[in-house]
Amino acid sequence: MKKRLTPRIRQMLEDSLREFPELEGKTVTVGYTRSYLGTAFVPAEVETRASMGIRLRARNLVYNTIGHELTHLVQGLGHVSLKRAVAPLSKIPGGEKQCDIWTLARSALFCDDAPTYLRLPRVVRENWPRYAEAIRFLCIAAIEKRRTHRFYIQWLERQIRLIARGLTPEVDLSR
């Protein structure tokens, strides 16, 4: 990624990594991909010399993509620590939609573009900046709701549909 690592992308990576204290002190390799917005890879064992990292498509790169892939690293580290019967590093469940939810909830920095995997009405996707803050607060509420509500993702997507129709969601968004 060296030749594609522009000052803008370097700054985006540094800004994004600051939002992930779980990755502090760990080596994260950053590479380039043409096929997807991004991918993440975590070694199966923490002790192995294999590095964890992300691959990003440099063209039109957004903070949301970087945050999403870094969240996958945190998810993966949590699963590795669970295999070793160590206290998990992360309580982020595996999955793409879960990754979108936890990425948006982590920081407003990652709200610069609509998430890829959450089901969003067309009006929300096309007018993302208008809805970003409200959906971020809904993601935070969904994570809280997960403690007692098994179907929190469906709940979240239903709340997003309500907002798209101009209706009031079940939670207060005036934080």
Image (cartoon, grey):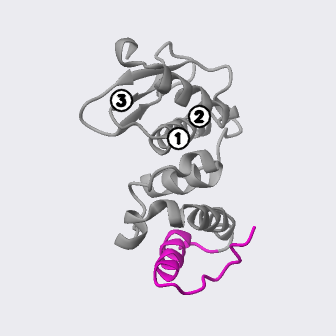
Q: Residue at x 50, y 50 (%)?
A: 99
Is residue 4 rendered magenta in the image?
no
**Mark 2 touches mark 3? (CB < 8 Å):** no
How many discs mark residues in the rendered view? 3
Characterize the local packing of mark 3: few (<14), some (14-19) or many (20 or more) Cα atoms within 10 angstroms: some
Q: Amino acid at mark 2?
A: Ser
Percent position (x, y) of residue 59?
32, 33
Q: Earlier in the sequence, mark 2 or mark 3?
A: 2
Q: Amino acid at mark 3?
A: Ala
The numbered mark at residue 16 is: 2
- Relative depth, front residue between 27 and 109: 109
Element at label 1: helix
Percent position (x, y) of residue 19?
66, 37
- Relative depth, front residue between 85 and 90: 90
Residue identified by numbered label 1 = 67
Q: Please indicate, yes or no, whether residue 121 appears anywhere in the rendered image.
A: no
Percent position (x, y) of residue 18?
67, 31
Q: Residue at x 52, y 35 (%)?
A: 73
Look at the image and tell me in which quarter the N terminus lies: top left
**Mark 2 touches mark 1? (CB < 8 Å):** yes
Numbered range of the magenta stretch = 149-175
Q: Earlier in the sequence, mark 2 or mark 1?
A: 2
